[in-house]
Amino acid sequence: MTSLELRQINKNYGAYHALRGIDLSVAQGEFIVMVGPSGCGKSTLLKTIAGLEEISSGQILINGRDVSKQEPGDRGIAMVFQSYALYPHMTVAENMGFGLRMAKRPKAEIEAAVQRAAKILRITDQLEKRPKQLSGGQRQRVAIGRAITRSPDVFLFDEPLSNLDAALRTQMRVELSSLHAELGATMVYVTHDQVEAMTMASRIVVLNQGVIEQVGSPLELYRNPDNLFVAGFLGAPRMNFLGVTVDEVSGRNVTVSAPGLVPVTVDLAEATVLAKGASLTLGVRPENISMVADGAQGGAINGAVRLVEHLGRETILYVDAGNLRTIASESGTGNITVQLSYVAPFAADQNVALKLDANELYLFSPDGGRTISVRKTTLDR
């Protein structure tokens, strides 16, 4: 059953086209996470679903009802904001039951809904406190509890964990995932944090400049991005992109090279019509680069370590590959980034030789950066 459906949603601010023909169907009980760079339209899209922004054209359907012109309170949604938006003079219980009181629900019904939400969120011992007496995580739980009491058709979350410290964000990610599993509710969640997207989503929606670039499960998008933008946006550290030239095409095998890159062969999912001499972009994730045994020569890429990050269980290297042309933008740093799953005693200016995993290479076309028929297997949930 479709819980939320967006049909050709457009949003204009004068001459600025913020959302461009958005189509999306969300099944009952899905946890949808919308990600993208600042200004891509993800928060605007969430606000149009909530009714806080009026769409310029298109339709928004919730459980089959066209709510495009309805007021926010009539849409069957509940929204949790980045700011907790709690009333400081009210107790936790009063804050959580405020929406139901405004809807003039019976007192017994309000009390039962508040108790149920408090039990789910494990804040039953906080109900008589006021917001100033709570920690940041507790305040966010109250804001979520206020949404739960309304029993909405769709929950909307607008970067709700951004104001929390790193440890608390991790804890709240687990709690939100558990909450989703317990309620079986439809949730649409906006974040700029790809870790939140990868760990919580049933499906991820990647937006860029008001357009949906790709929709899919976390591992599907990570393993099989449709284009260079999605490949570069998902993954930390981000994918390396190298400018290469086609040396040879033989059936599904394409051999590419570049100054500073020993020829490597990419196995495509199907035969290609690529021509010898064509310019492409080669992509390889940092975790799919290893070190050659002698550490100084003989690799697909030879270079010098510019910076080392020791992260305890892993080591991140930023390698200057000399003449090799890396494609730097928001999707890269300008160096070759290597992620080693062990503690490695490398130092700045040390010469290294890098080996690329031939089974984990991607090719992107120069025209729009579309992925060229590279399909990776994935053990998806």
Image: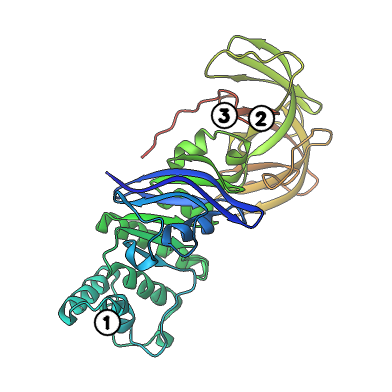
In the drawing, does residue 381 fall left or right of residue 85? Answer: left
Q: Position of residue 333 (x, y in %)?
A: 72, 47
Tell me the quarter of the picture where residue 87 sits. Answer: bottom left
Residue located farthest toward the top when viewing the structure as drawn: 250
Query: The disc labelled 3 sits on which kind of residue?
Result: Glu
Location of the C terminus by quadrant is: top left
Q: Is residue 25 above or below residue 92?
A: above
| Helix, strand or loop for disc 3 | helix
Q: Is residue 176 above or below residue 146?
A: above
Q: Residue at x 69, y 44 (%)?
A: 332
Residue located farthest toward the bottom when viewing the structure as drawn: 89
In the drawing, does residue 377 fall left or right of residue 144? Answer: right
Q: Is residue 205 above or below residue 270?
A: below
Location of the N terminus by quadrant is: top left
Q: Position of residue 360 (x, y in %)?
A: 57, 29
**Would you call the spot at circle 3 few (<14 residues within 10 Å), some (14-19), or many (20 or more)?**
some
Query: The disc labelled 2 sits on which kind of residue?
Result: Lys
Q: Which mark is residue 355?
A: 2
Tell me the quarter of the picture where residue 127 sits. Answer: bottom left
Q: Residue at x 31, y 75 (%)?
A: 99
Mark 3–mark 2 CB contact (< 8 Å): no
Q: Earlier in the sequence, mark 3 or mark 2?
A: 2
| Residue for badge 1 | 125
Q: Earlier in the sequence, mark 1 or mark 3?
A: 1
| Helix, strand or loop for disc 2 | strand
Query: The disc labelled 1 sits on which kind of residue?
Result: Asp
| Residue for badge 3 | 360
Q: Position of residue 286 (x, y in %)?
A: 62, 40
In the drawing, does residue 277 fall left or right of residue 193? Answer: right
Q: Earlier in the sequence, mark 1 or mark 2?
A: 1
Q: Position of residue 339 (x, y in %)?
A: 61, 43
How is the protein colored in the picture? Answer: rainbow
